[in-house]
Amino acid sequence: MRKLIFANQKGGVAKTSTALNVAYEIARQNNRVLFIDLDPQASATSSVFGNLEFDEKNIYQVLTGPKAISDVTVHAEKFKFDIVPSHVLLSGFELQIANRIGRERLLEQELNGLPYDIAIVDCPPSLGLLTINALTAADEVFIPICPEYFSLKGIILFQQTMDEVKKQLGASFKFRGVIITRYRSRIVAREAVEEVRKFFGPLVFETVIPENIRVEESHNAHIPVAVLDKKCKATLAFKELAKEVLS
């Protein structure tokens, strides 16, 4: 099972919508996909299920011990994948397990032996213990960025965190690269993209996800963008991005 992590310590970069729609595009190619919402804000969970709450089935119950992932997965019919929902209790996760031995590898342990081809993890917008758990479990890491709110220092800080996780915890993930999201053809955005490509070179994905109202509409309708509008620019971009991710 390939474990793909979507992470950025900065919010507002379309991380969740990118992870969800890439997961959908991968799942519709007859891959068995597990989506894990590791963000206490539960943006992915609400995007898929609306206001439904999962007090008995969520990732918090897995990481704190009572249940296994197989006990808490929910099938998202319209997205064609299984999802482990998030829960607001996850916001207190770090304090609760602060003294536990192996606290950085709880997710990794739970992912072993699951019957999926791909696991996709949507991380919280932070560099805390939840993100570190995702990194230690990961095979591949992807960083979505929005060029109009781009901070090179922030990405460098995240790279340093990845290096530390590899060095201190022996993680063996590969940093696959940066995904440009919410792109609008403005001077500031074009200049930012140029800076990103100059700094990261081949680690910038060719596919750029455009700013598109259909993405927000699909979130409100709790369906993938491709189901809402199969011909819009965002749909076509997510299809191409999924191909790059799988390559």
Image: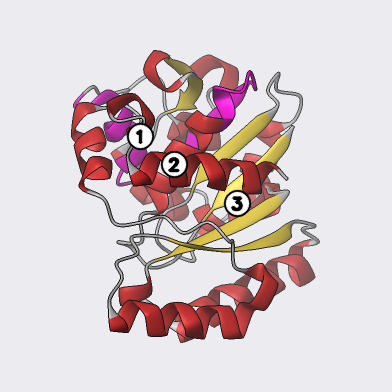
Label 3 vs label 1, nearer the camera: 1
Q: Is residue 96 above or below residue 168?
A: above
Q: Is residue 167 above or below residue 96?
A: below
The 10 Å Cα crowd at callout 1, few under 14, some 14 to 19, many 20 or more, is few
The amino acid at mark 1 is: Lys
Marked residue nearer the N-terminal end (3 or 1): 3
Q: Position of residue 135 (x, y in %)?
A: 64, 55
Q: Position of residue 92 (x, y in %)?
A: 36, 49
The amino acid at mark 2 is: Leu
Q: Position of residue 65 (x, y in %)?
A: 55, 31
Q: Residue at horizontal 49%, vertical 66%?
A: 127
Q: Quickly name the residue at label 2.
A: 236
The 10 Å Cα crowd at callout 2, few under 14, some 14 to 19, many 20 or more, is some
Q: Which mark is residue 133?
A: 3
Q: Residue at horizontal 51%, vertical 21%?
A: 81
Local secondary structure at mark 2: helix
Q: Which mark is residue 231?
A: 1
Q: Determine if residue 149 is in view.
A: no
Find out whether residue 92 is within the magenta segment.
no
Q: Are marks 2 and 1 in contact (CB under 8 Å)?
A: yes
Q: Is residue 156 above or below residue 164?
A: below
- First to last magenta residue range: 26-51
Q: Which mark is residue 216?
A: none
Q: Residue at horizontal 24%, vertical 41%?
A: 214
Marked residue nearer the N-terminal end (2 or 1): 1
Quarter of the image with the C terminus in it: top right
The 10 Å Cα crowd at callout 3, few under 14, some 14 to 19, many 20 or more, is many
Label 2 vs label 3, nearer the camera: 2
Quarter of the image with the N terminus in it: top right
Local secondary structure at mark 1: loop
The amino acid at mark 3 is: Asn
Q: Nearer the viewer, residue 144 or 28?
A: 28
